[in-house]
Structure formats: C-alpha cells, structure tokens
Amino acid sequence: MYEQQSLLGDDIDYKATEANVKHFLTRVYPRAKRMAGKELANIQSPQITDMPKGAPAGNPLEQRIVQRTYAQQVVKATVNAIYRCDAFSREVLDLLYLQGYSDSACYMAIGYQRSQYFKRIKPKALRQFAEAYELEDLEIHR
C-alpha cells in the first residue's frame, strides 16, 4: 500500500516553513533577480590560441548561461507563486518582496496593527507562498 499525502498539511512544520520562505524571499530571490538581469552580450566565447594552457575545468560560458536561465526561472516562479495566493496574502507579499516595502510600511499600508500583522497575516502569506511555489518544495515537513 502507499501512504496518502495529506492536503491538510498535518505534517508541516509551520514555523520552519515560514523561516524557509523568508530566507528564500530575502536572500535567494533578490540574488536570482540580479543574476537574471545580466546581459548575455557581456559573456564572451572562449578565445582559441595556439599557446598551451592548462585544461579548463568545464565550460564557464555554458555554466553562466545555465545559471542565468535558472535565475530567470526562479524569478518567474516567484512572481507566479505570489499571484496564486489569495488576494490579501498576494497584497502583503507584493508590497514586501516585489515593491520593497518594510514590514512596518506594509502593515500600515494594509491597515492592520503590528501584532496582528506578525502573528497572523504575514505568517499566513508566507505559508501560502510555500504551497504555491513550483520549482522546489519550500515547506518543511516533520
């Protein structure tokens, strides 16, 4: 027999998931945005000369192209995941991670008190993002 996955999230560690999503959205996503925006024009093909050199380890040009392509996928998947959340969570995530609002500017913009924002609203938005993100599983399971 097989073990059925619960759609209710019974095995999810919510605090760890929230921390994982925060790390992703504050560290990984901004780096991916920077990498995705690099121009391929400044990537040069290897120079062929008749001078002897040490053997290169791999193909650095190909590696940079692959990294840039993956970074573009991360950026697209992040924006798509934000827009798959419910309207309220989408607004919070958009303000924080797409528009660059601080937490205090965000809870003032949406009209909630600081305590409600940190206890209920932001954690819910982070959990919804983890559910919606497609490139990797951001949920932490027990």
Image: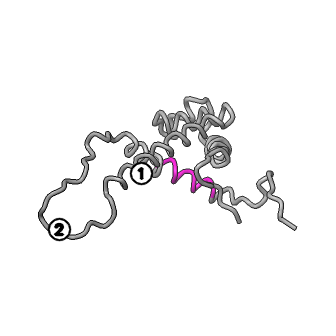
Whole-angstrom CA distance, mark 2 to mark 1, is: 25 Å
Point 17% across, 68% down: residue? 53
The image position of residue 8, as x and y in percent, is: 80, 52
10 Å neighbourhood of mark 1: few (<14), some, or many (≥20)?
few
The image position of residue 89, as x and y in percent, is: 64, 37
Q: Which residues are magenta?
A: 17-26
**Which image quarter is the N terminus in?**
bottom right
Q: Secondary structure at mark 1?
A: helix
Q: Where does label 1 land, which residue?
A: 66
Query: Is residue 19 found inside the magenta-colored segment of the image?
Result: yes
Badge 1 amino acid? Val
Q: Where does label 2 land, which residue?
A: 53
Point 50% across, 34% down: residue? 105
Q: Earlier in the sequence, mark 2 or mark 1?
A: 2
Point 55% across, 42% down: residue? 78
Instruction: Name the chief secondary structure element in magenta.
Output: helix
Residue nearer the viewer, 37 or 62: 62
Q: Secondary structure at mark 2?
A: loop
Q: Is residue 88 above or below residue 62?
A: above
